[in-house]
Amino acid sequence: MRENLKRLKELNDYGDRVSESSKVEETSEEIPESEMIQCPCGRFIKSPAEYKLLYLKKEQNEIDILCPNDACYLRELGFVKFKVDEVRRKLIVQSASFYPPFVTWNAARLGAEKAHEILKQHLKEIVTKYIDWNRVKEDYFKRLEEAKAKAAKEESSSS
C-alpha cells in the first residue's frame, strides 16, 4: 500500500514538472494570491477552468466539482444539480453550490463579500462554459433507453 502511495506521489510530481515546463507564457497579468480562491489544502485556483468536474452521481443528476489537487483531503468542493425534462429532452440546472468548508475558508481569507462574488462567478462559468451539457444529456438518454429496453425484455420474458 505504501509503495503504491509513494509511486502515485512520484507520478503526480512528474506530472506537475511536465505541466510546469510545458506552460505557455501568459500574456495577462498574474493574479495576486490575495485575489485568488484557495482550497483549504493550499491549492490556489486562478480560474474556474482549473476545477475538475466529475459526473459520477448519474442517478442523482449531480456533477461534482473537485479540487484540482489530486492529493487534496477535501477533494469535493461543490456540486451542480440538474433535472431532466424527458418530454422536451432538456436538462435544467436546479442548483450549483460550493460546500461550506470551502466557502468559509475563502471568506476568512478574502472577506465574505469578495469571496462570495468570486465563487459565484466561478459557479456561473462552470455551469455555462465548462460542463459539456450535450455529453451529459446524451449519456442520460442513452441510460434511459437501456433501462426501458431492459424492462421491456424482462416483461416479455416473464409472460
Image: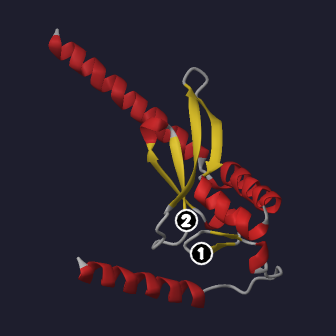
The residue singled out by tag 1 in the image is 43
The x, y position of residue 149, in whole percent, is 32, 24
Q: Where residue 67 appears, x then y in whole percent?
A: 55, 65
- Eyeballing the image, is 120 above or below 27? above
Name the side, left or right, on which 107 lies relative to 139. right
Q: Up-down: is 4 above or below 65? A: below
Q: Are marks 1 and 2 in contact (CB under 8 Å)?
A: yes
Q: Residue furthest left?
A: 158
- Residue type beneath disc 1: Arg
Q: Amino acid at mark 2?
A: Cys
Q: Is residue 23 left or right of residue 1?
A: right
Of residues 134 and 32, the one drawn nearer to the viewer in this rendering = 32
**Residue 111: percent from left, percent from top:** 79, 64
SS of the residue under disc 1:
loop
Where's the N terminus, which quadrant?
A: bottom left
Work out whether 49 lies above or below 142.
below
Is the residue marked by circle 1 packed among few (<14), some (14-19), or many (20+) residues within 10 Å? some
Nearer the observer, 15 or 76: 76
Q: Which mark is residue 67?
A: 2
